[in-house]
Image: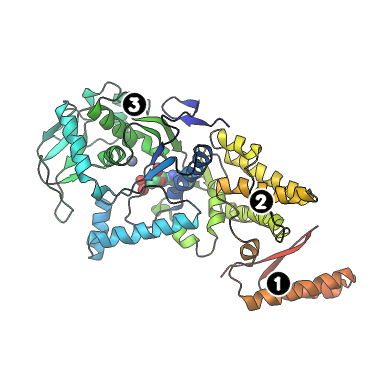
Amino acid sequence: MSLKLYDTMAREKRPFVPADPERVTMYVCGPTVYGYAHIGNFRPVVVFDVLFRVLRHIYGQDAVVYARNVTDVDDKINAKAVAEGVPIKTITDRYLAAYNADAAALKALPPSLAPHATDHIQAMQNQIAALIQRGAAYAAEGHVLFSIEAFPDYGQLSGRPLDEMIAGARVEVAPYKRHPADFVLWKPSKPGEPVWDSPWGAGRPGWHIECSAMIEAVLGLPIDIHGGGIDLTFPHHENELAQARCAHDLPTYANYWLHNGFLDMSGEKMSKSLGNVIIPHELLETTPGEVIRWALLSAHYRQPLDWTPSLIEQSRAALDRLYGALQRVKGLDHEDAAPPAGVLEALSDDLNTPKAYAELFALAKALETAHGEGKALAKAELLAAANLLGFLEADPDVWFAGGADDELRGKVETLLEARKTARTAKDWAAADRIRGELDAMGVIVMDSAEGATWRLKDPV
Ligand code: AMP
Ligand code: ZN
């Protein structure tokens, strides 16, 4: 299969060719750990997880190195620590653990590397020193600034002329800046903030240098793929790129730039002031992570994703259909199969997940209608295709029964058996009564040609 990816820099889909197929490198900007991440923050998590899975399928499980950083030095982290009267590490440990747990619940594989900014301060200082040496940065009043005039390609990624960028970017005006768009590489820490010694005065790194220095330290320059949300294109990625290229006189920083579109709430921006912020950490109490993952991948990753109240229900229904097909062949042994061509083609076309979903439904249908030996192969193919997208790893019984204990499960099975007997005897009154009883127990019965499956209304 030939993978094509839309490259923000080239502004078109390009065939993906890694510099070294035995070591494919991908970096995605990760979380700033000062609070629970919202549902929009998890869109890049699952999108780049699908890409990670696809790359591993093509190049081999161990041939892909995926790094997602943790920003653990930031104004917001510090403010939160001050507000709670606890050390900064208490805050970052707490929210990083929650982030990792939520990402796992959303079936995202752990990245190969998760570098923490505070562990790579030396690498940042080295990159800053290299920039100063080449005349692309200057120290002034305890700050070090990148000099954008030293980099004629500045603006190439976001594609905006410099004056427009300056107008749109709320650039900080400071007397020590030579050019209004020069940005901070190093700055003095405010009282109470973490502080590190440096040749330019005690202080802390700017945000952009964190990523370019960590990429240099843990992956090496240049990398194959750099990803993140579309909002990071400017200034964050533009600045990362400028730093890394100028520090080492490189023609390229990342060979492919991938950006996911934004998630909106019923057409509105998600914001605290509008009171419409959804936090997976809370949503996961009532909704399986796989359902949230399905919802997040239901639109093509570059398109906006409109999060509506019905999206979760539609996603649950879609997964019920697929798990239903698997439940009906539960006892059927199968060998492993390769993912079928249809789903590979869909994902190879710039990660077309809506098309891949259609392929999963087609495979489920093929499974339902297959006979004899073909049925085992159909089951294996559905599972292999789903695995590429991170779905259908649960036991179908567990999926449907949710948190039901053995006692409840036994009762439900007995009632369903009695209902089946009543229906076979055309005793519709008895069948309805049993269905009512199941309903009162919070059980939803789903009938199909192949028999009935069930699940709890509100998983406990
Ligand atoms: P942040 O912690 O704000 O740097 O965001 C972490 C990641 O989530 C970045 O890649 C952002 O681009 C992305 N992101 C933030 N908000 C949204 C949103 N509403 N929809 C999609 N991606 C988002
Ligand atoms: Zn970054």
Q: Which residue is mark 2?
A: 335
Q: Position of residue 408 (x, y in %)?
A: 65, 76
**Left or right of 44, for residue 1:** right
Q: Which mark is residue 439?
A: 1
Dot 3 falls on a residue whose secondary structure is loop
Dot 1 falls on a residue whose secondary structure is helix
Rate crowding at label 1 as few (under 14), some (14 to 19) or many (20 or more) other CA atoms within 10 Å. some
Name above or below for residue 246 compared with residue 336: above
Is there any visible trace of residue 2 in the rendered image? Answer: yes
Q: Which mark is residue 54?
A: none
Is there any visible trace of residue 173 in the rendered image? Answer: no
Using the numbered discs, state the Cα–Cα distance from disc 3 to disc 1 in whole angstroms: 61 Å
How is the model colour-coded? rainbow
Q: Which residue is mark 3?
A: 252
Using the numbered discs, state the Cα–Cα distance from disc 2 to disc 3 in whole angstroms: 44 Å
User: If you read the primary sequence from the N terminus, does the residue marked by circle 3 or circle 1 appear first?
Assistant: 3
User: If you read the primary sequence from the N terminus, does the residue marked by circle 2 or circle 1 appear first?
Assistant: 2
Q: Residue at x 33, y 62 (%)?
A: 94
Q: Position of residue 155 (x, y in %)?
A: 33, 26
